Amino acid sequence: MGDSAKKGISHRLVHLWLVFIIVIFSGTVVFATMRLTDTFLDVTEAAGRSSELHHAAHELMNASDYLTEQVQRFTVKGDVRFMDQYFTEAFESKRREEAVATMSGDSRMDAARSRLQEAMDHSVELMDTEYYAMRLVIEAKGYRDYPEVLKGVTLTEEDAVLSPEEKISLATELVHGDAYYEQKDAIREDMQASMDEVEKLMSIVEASEMDTLRSQIGVVHVAILIQAALLFFLIWLTTRLAINPVMGAVEEIKADRPISEVGSNEFRYLARAYNKMYEKNKSSIENLSYKASHDELTGAYNRAGYEFLLSRVELDATYMMLFDLDDFKNINDTYGHETGDRALIKLVKVLKSVFRDEDCICRIGGDEFIVFLMHSGGLQPGLIEEKIEMIRKALQNTEDGLPPVSVSIGIMNGKDAKDTKELFEMTDAAMYRSKKIGKGTHTFYS
């Protein structure tokens, strides 16, 4: 088999050529699609705008009719609820003002907005009559609690001396009479004129946009066919060179077998790298059984495990921490060796609870422990200090019947060491510096 067959086709090279071809043929697709999208959005916007403007005109009339309904109920029944609902609409809901604002900002809407504003002005003028009618009812009923705006309405001398029944009769006439409804008709006429202007403008806009849309669809159809053919070929090639090899690799990994070196050149390179790690890992597992690598008392890695881990540590991505139990001999002498053993076991349990599963805890001496913080080259010292504080608090807790203990700690970032020997020596030096400073402290080597 030739060298090129062993290497396979370069996925990168194939994709570069495909990308170049697709870019050339996709120029038309992108341009036509963008134009088509813009046109479609314009059509949709025009339709939505038309509906919005119609709704705005109707809302103004609905709000005006609602105000009329509330003031008429108030003059007939004298129930303050209707007065409150009137002013809620007028000063809080403000549907009339929102209707006029809807047409703002578009110069094409000037004519429609002008007629809608006239309807709004008539509605506002009508409110003067409605205010006066409500003030008559308030005077007739003797209400003391009513909106501040009505306090500014002054009855004429002639109306002020009317009896309560006459005031209510006059108020009812004001909001039910012919003059009142003539103003309402003027509002409707302005609103209808506004809607006619909207329909005229929107029909022109929609017709123009639809013509443009139809002319662009044909171009897009042809461009899509070319694009589809290129994408089909790309999918087929990706499946052959990458997806199928990956799926096969997944099955082989599940079966704990080496990966077949097939597919693109890049995937074959990954397969070879994985197979090397696979063989190395298999060999490592066989050479390092649990009993041979772990301390029987604490369950931490023993000296052999530590040496194995140290020989494979990635300096740039590892922190080393050296823990030494302070006055451990005194604990054994005072409380007995059984208590000393329990203290060591407690320390390892605490370390396992604080550090991640991927971090490795090793017992390298009687009361000395090493912790490898794996994949942590960029870890901030502040986070390490938080973990140290958690460890100290746990070791000072005596609820388990053990005496409080402290540890002196040395810490070293592997990226600052030239090799693993120097890494340990610097970490050890940092720990002894902690001992000199005062037991129960920690030191970062610098």
Image (spheres, rainbow, N blue to C red):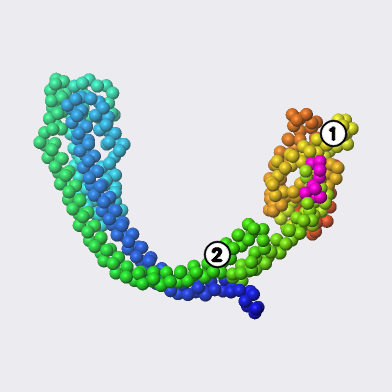
Indicate the secondary structure of the residue bearing disc 2: helix
Tell me if mark 1 has few (under 14), some (14-19) or many (20+) residues whose alpha carbon lies within 10 angstroms of its own.
few
- Residue at 22%, 41% in the rendered image: 62
Residue 150 x, y percent position in the rendering:
25, 29
Q: Which stretch did the figure color magenta? A: 290-298
What's the residue type where badge 2 is placed?
Ile
Q: Is residue 118 above or below residue 281?
A: above
Residue 178 percent across, percent down from the top left? 10, 36
Query: What residue would you read off at disc 1?
Result: 338
Residue 9 percent coordinates (x, y): 58, 74
Which numbered disc, 2 or 1, marks the residue closer to the eye? 2
Location of residue 291 in the rendering, given as x and y in whole percent from the top left corner: 80, 48
Q: Is residue 314 above or below residue 80?
A: below
Left or right placement of residue 277 versus residue 308 in this view: left
SS assignment at label 1: helix
Residue 149 on the magenta segment = no
Q: Horizontal placement of 327 versus 27: left or right? A: right
Q: Is 97 placed above or below 157 here?
A: below
For residue 243, which numbered disc appears in the image? 2
